[in-house]
Image (tube, rainbow, N blue to C red):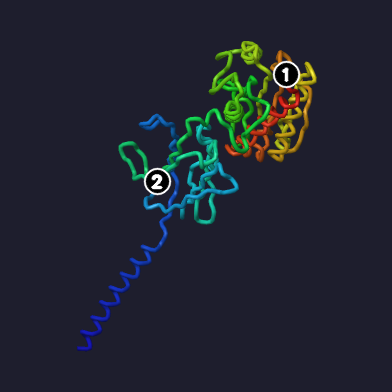
Amino acid sequence: MKKIWCRLLIVICCVLGIMGTGSLTAQAAVNHTLNYFRYNNFKDDDGRSWVRIEMGMNKGDLEYEVSQNPDKPFQLIIKMNNTNRGDVKKNIGLDRKIARYMTLKNENRDMVATIAVTDSLEDHEYKVYTAEADKKAKKPYRLVVEIAADKGSPNKAIGDEKLYGVEGRTVVIDPGHGGSDSGAIGPSYVKEKNVTLNISLDVARILESNGVNVVMTRTTDVDVYGPDATDKQELQARVNVSRRHPEADIFVSIHCNAFTNSSAHGTGTYYYGHSSRDSLLSQLIQDEMVAATGLYDRGIHSANFYVLRNSWIPATLVETAFISNPYEENMLASAEVQHTMALAICKGISNYFQNIGK
């Protein structure tokens, strides 16, 4: 009888041990690692424009929280529990029409995704949900964020992007380099031509939302003149873009600085000096750039740059930061910093038009 009770006790202990282990396993958090990122624009059945952001991961059953920051009404915040960033970039530029950028930041064991939209988040419909793996489409289990654009939003600027004195003006924006000319390349292989295009496109979006007619020398990664052009041909092609628009008021060329000594740092702005308006435009943009970025103020300087010397309207060339400096290269690669710089340039342009009057 004693042997039977002992055996029964052993069985009960084993069962309880298995149950206990199972309970602990169920309570243990599932670790997720991001391994996939895509975004695309689409229209729904009503013709409304949306941006869809997909963040894929190695496992399912993700727990997440969605919130808004009352101090930053343009941000949608999603905390993914027990998740790490994996190989997905921490700073990602988005379509810039509905959503400007997304940042990914680890906080202890969790991942926080911050998505900045172009208007106040209250003016957007948005959805956040998980989707199962789709083997046919080669998509893993993923968290999906969909954000709709208001139909009137492209013609309405609000919040920190509201500018004054610019409506009805025409501004030529010149993203430096492009196509076969990468411009300077940073120590982590960030290319100047990509940074300048991203900033320029955001400048154009902000200005257009404030009623400005924007003319771009390029909107994609191309040579303005065409392949195999000489430096002079390429630069003259940029000047010619503005000459084809006699209504243009100013010309703004956007670049990244570089030097052989990687310790060189700061932001600077250049002008040729056809009139006092060239230096005024440069100074007002420089002031806003320094205030917004906190970078060392290299001041404004007269320079014999081709696009400035041959411009027939007030012109400036902005050297945003040193891509050859590892710290500043990291800043320039950040979608959030790119937006900060774009907004600073726009505010400088706004101050210029307010200063000169009609």
> What numbered label is drawn on residue 179?
none
Numbered disc 2: secondary structure? strand
Crowding at dot 1, Cα within 10 Å, few <14 / some 14-19 / many 20+, comes out as many
Q: Which residue is drawn at 57% across and 18% down?
A: 223
Residue 12 on image: x %, y %? 27, 77
Residue 122 on image: x %, y %? 51, 42
Which residue in the rendered view is the most extreme toward the bottom?
1
Q: Can residue 176 be seen in this view?
A: no
Q: In which quarter of the image is residue 264?
A: top right
Q: Label 1 near label 2: C-beta < 8 Å?
A: no
Residue 40 on image: x %, y %? 43, 33
Q: Can residue 131 be seen in this view?
A: yes
Residue for badge 1: 314
Q: Which residue is drawn at 77% across and 28% down?
A: 300
Residue 218 on image: x %, y %? 57, 20
Residue 337 falls left or right of residue 28: right
Numbered disc 1: secondary structure? loop
Q: Quadrant of residue 292?
A: top right
| Amino acid at dot 1 | Pro
State how far apart marks 2 and 1 are (Cα): 50 Å
Quadrant of the drawing holding the N terminus:
bottom left
Q: In this view, does 170 lie above or below 11?
A: above
Q: In this view, does 303 lie above or below 96?
A: above
Residue for badge 2: 129
- Foreground residue among 151 and 137: 151
Q: Residue at x 50, y 30 (%)?
A: 152
